[in-house]
Amino acid sequence: FYTGRASDDPVRNAKNELISLITILSRAAIRGGLNTQTSLQLTNRWIKNVEQARSTEELSFIMLGSIQSFTEQVAESKRKTIVNSDINHILQFIQDHVHLPLSCSYLAHLFGYSSSYLSRKFKQETGSTLTSFIKQCKLESSKQLLRFTHKSLSEISSYYCFSSQSHFQTSFKKQYGLTPMQYRQLSSR
């Protein structure tokens, strides 16, 4: 994939081309439905990885990882498209306010439903329980802080309103098969 010659250094040429590819992936992901903020965060992460690479072989792995990452994020955003507009509003609210102490009773009150009705309707429309969706959104969002910040696990678990750092770590490991620190280390490579 390395064809341009903007520099005499083959690694620099490969970096330039990969940065261009990542930019194109970002724009395509946004057109594919990924929100702009997430796309830009991914772009920044992958370009940082490109700049830290020292060989064309390492850049090849980064290229494959970036393509997979953008593809998975677009696919995930597509899965969240629900027909029922009321449930869509609730989904959007959860995603926009994932740092709040969200619960079924809180959302039911906020949107004018009974807890049992909202819980049943949410499960019908999404195939997931409201509680597990909230936790999944918090965990997914926490991955961004693990990747792009140096916040401690305590700060992250508190920000996303987990009952404790231990609960956050256990939930994260159950969801992704890695501890938050293992995930941070792997994603910073």
Image (cartoon, rainbow, N blue to C red):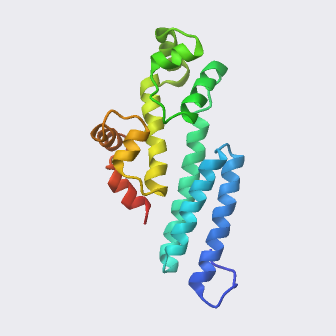
Please, which residue is most extreme toward the bottom here? 8
In the rendered image, residue 3, in percent from the top left (x then y), is placed at 67, 80
Q: Quadrant of residue 80?
A: top right
The spot of residue 31 in percent (x, y) is 72, 47
Left or right, residue 62 beside residue 174: right
The residue that appears at 55% across and 34% down in the rendered structure is 95
> Which image quarter is the C terminus in?
bottom left
Report x, y in % for residue 87: 60, 21
Instruction: Please report the residue visible at 32 percent of the width from the left and 40 percent of the height from the top.
Output: 174
Q: Residue at x 70, y 84 (%)?
A: 6
Task: Report the side of 57 relative to 84 (left or right).
Answer: left
Q: Quadrant of residue 12?
A: bottom right
User: In the image shown, does 11 or 142 lie closer to the viewer?
Assistant: 142
Q: Quadrant of the N terminus?
A: bottom right
- 8 over 69 or under it: above or below: below
User: Where is residue 127 drawn, in percent x and y?
Assistant: 49, 24
**How many numbered marks appear?**
0
Residue at image coords 58%, 11%: 112
Q: Nearer the viewer, residue 21 or 102?
A: 102
